[in-house]
């Protein structure tokens, strides 16, 4: 799937809008998918604030983000502009303590 | 052929995997939008030497690449464990 420049720039600016940005289905209060809910639970347990983007509310973002990261599923977590992974990876990094370090270490 | 078996065979072949298990967990997600569209929820374990020296993100990208055709059609969601034979040996119940 190709990505046009305006969409790429838009996604880039969303990803750069916060230190921790989660593309998910639904929002932090009401996740609309079990995998998104799991990542929210993990982030909630580690940090007070982060940005979420509801892909269900914006089909350009929903399809674009998969091409942007070459990752075909949602949720997708970004830290300081870098793609971290989806639900399995976030869960594994949480269990190993790696995620806590990554989220709480200074930039 | 059952799509679960087809996915399993594709993974086994593509990764020369020493162990592959794909479980269809779609019945846990009845009524979920992805299921209504015909896509299943699957869980996969893939053990392969090809994962040696690769980050989790890279390993999972390789799996998604192999299943590119199925993603969004037969597969709505895929949760996976991608292990090297050494990791698999460690994690296996004694």
Image (tube, grey):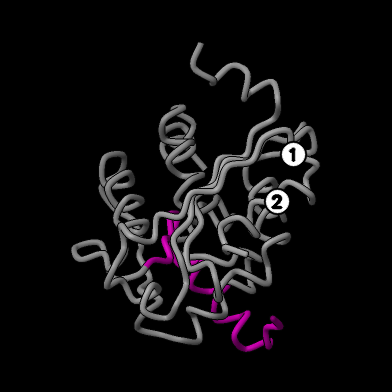
Marks 1 & 2, CB-CB < 8 Å contact? yes
The residue under label 1 is B17
Q: Residue at x 33, y 46 (%)?
A: A43
The one of A76 and A105 positioned closer to us in this rendering:
A76
Q: Does dot 2 land on a helix, a strand or a loop?
A: helix
Name which residue lies at 64% across and 41% down: B20
Residue B38's x, y, as percent? 45, 77
Q: Which stretch is magenta?
A: A1-24
According to the picture, the residue beneath numbered tag 2 turns out to be B11
Based on the displayed image, in which of its 4 quarters is residue B50 positioned? top right
Q: Chain of mark 2?
A: B
Q: Position of residue A48 (x, y in %)?
A: 25, 47
Sequence-wise, the earlier of marks 1 and 2 is: 2
Whether residue B92 appears in magenta in the rendering, the answer is no
Secondary structure category for the residue under label 1: loop
Q: Label 1: few (<14), some or many (≥20) within 10 Å? A: many
Q: Residue at x 40, y 76 (%)?
A: A55
Quarter of the figure that contains the N terminus of chain B:
bottom right
Observer-nearest of B60 and A53? B60
Q: Position of residue A15 (x, y in %)?
A: 51, 66
Instruction: Pinpoint the chain carrying mark 1.
Output: B
Does the magenta segment cover residue A22? yes
């Amino acid at each position: 799937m190709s990505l046009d420049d305006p969409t790429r720039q838009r996604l880039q600016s969303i990803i750069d809008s916060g230190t921790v940005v989660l593309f998910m289905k639904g929002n932090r209060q009401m996740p609309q998918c079990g995998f998104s809910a799991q990542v929210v639970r993990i982030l909630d347990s580690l940090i007070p604030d982060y940005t979420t983007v509801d892909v269900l509310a914006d089909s350009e973002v929903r399809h674009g983000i998969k091409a942007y990261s070459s990752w075909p599923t949602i949720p997708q977590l970004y830290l300081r502009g870098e793609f971290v992974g989806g639900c399995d990876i976030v869960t594994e990094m949480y269990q190993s303590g790696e995620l806590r370090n990554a989220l709480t270490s200074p930039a | 052929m059952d799509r679960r078996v087809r996915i399993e065979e594709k993974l086994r072949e593509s990764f020369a995997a020493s162990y592959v298990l794909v479980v269809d967990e779609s019945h846990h997600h009845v009524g979920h939008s992805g299921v209504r569209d015909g896509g299943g929820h699957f869980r996969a374990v893939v053990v392969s030497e090809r994962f040696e020296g690769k980050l989790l993100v890279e390993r999972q990208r390789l799996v998604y690449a192999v299943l590119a055709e199925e993603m969004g059609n037969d597969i709505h969601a895929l949760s996976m464990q991608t292990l090297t034979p050494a990791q698999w040996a460690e994690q296996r119940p004694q």
